[in-house]
Amino acid sequence: MQPITFFALPYAGGNATIYRHWGDRMPAWIRVVPLHMPGRGVRMRYSPVHEWQPLMELLLQDVEPYLDRPFAIFGHSMGALVGIKLAHELRRRHGVDPVWMGLSACIAPAMRERETKWLDCPHSELMDEIVSLNGTAPDILGNDEFMALIAPVLRADFHLCGTYARGDGPPLACPVLVLGGSQDDEVMESPDNLSAWAQETSGAFDLQLLDADHFFINSHQDDVIARVEASLERHVHTSSRGTIVGHTARAGAWPGAR
């Protein structure tokens, strides 16, 4: 199996450390590269970004050094929107598509409603949304100092989610795996919220549900990794000419590069 780069994007308010063990638990041909969002983790000193184009410019700098080899993209919740946006930006600027995409716990673009309230809504409304997602421990929610620190990041992230708009370009051509939690009330409010992701690719589409809530990427990590690995093994194939479905290897690409 020819190696691929696996770009991984976190959920709103989260940072790339949620993927810190994925590389150790996946086969050697999958090279996990977490992508870091501004305002947290290693980019704590960056101001939170609430507009899509500046975010794309930042992430493109991170991924461009890896474009001499096939790549996959995975994102959970907000990370799924960032991932699909990044995939289209890479196609537009560099003429390359991912060989696979994983989109997890996220309402599909065709089913999303525009929301522009998050940058200036009352703090109580922001807190209600955080609580409803059921992904933050009570002791953290009760830490006023920490919540004041993270609030600008969450406002920016929620605004990005609320203002996501798909471009006019054709859908991607790669296989897509969509994961959802059967107990994720918001995402599962309509069965079309996940199935509508099929509109975003002309390739193979697979929708799988876990018996979990919105943050199954943390609570069911073993299951998620197993499903992702199985999907990659099933859909990503190497030809004798050094080409993986959906991506033509450039000069100097794997094996042996870097």
Image: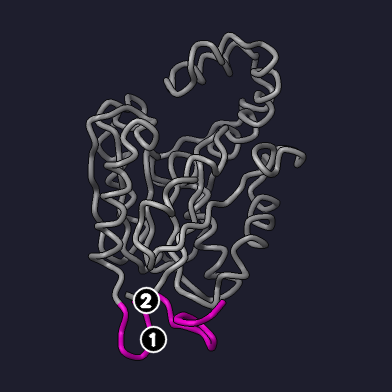
Kindly report the secondary structure that dominates the magenta region of the rendered protein: loop
> What residue would you read off at disc 1?
242
- Local crowd at mark 1 within 10 Å, few (<14), some, or many (≥20)? some
- Local crowd at mark 2 within 10 Å, few (<14), some, or many (≥20)? some
State left or right for residue 182 relative to residue 78: left
> What residue would you read off at disc 2?
2
Residue 115: image quadrant is top right
State left or right for residue 74 relative to residue 91: left
Locate residue 4, reporting x and y percent.
42, 69
State left or right for residue 240 relative to residue 255: left
Q: Is residue 174 above or below residue 44?
A: below
Secondary structure, mark 1, is loop
Amino acid beneath label 2: Gln
Q: Identify which residue is drawn at 32% across, 58% down.
A: 176
Mark 2 touches mark 1? (CB < 8 Å): yes
Q: Identify which residue is drawn at 26% across, 65% down.
A: 233
State left or right for residue 221 relative to residue 61: left
Locate residue 215, reporting x and y percent.
39, 31
Q: CA distance from mark 2 to mark 1?
A: 8 Å
**Which span is picked out in magenta?**
238-258
Q: Is residue 251 magenta?
A: yes
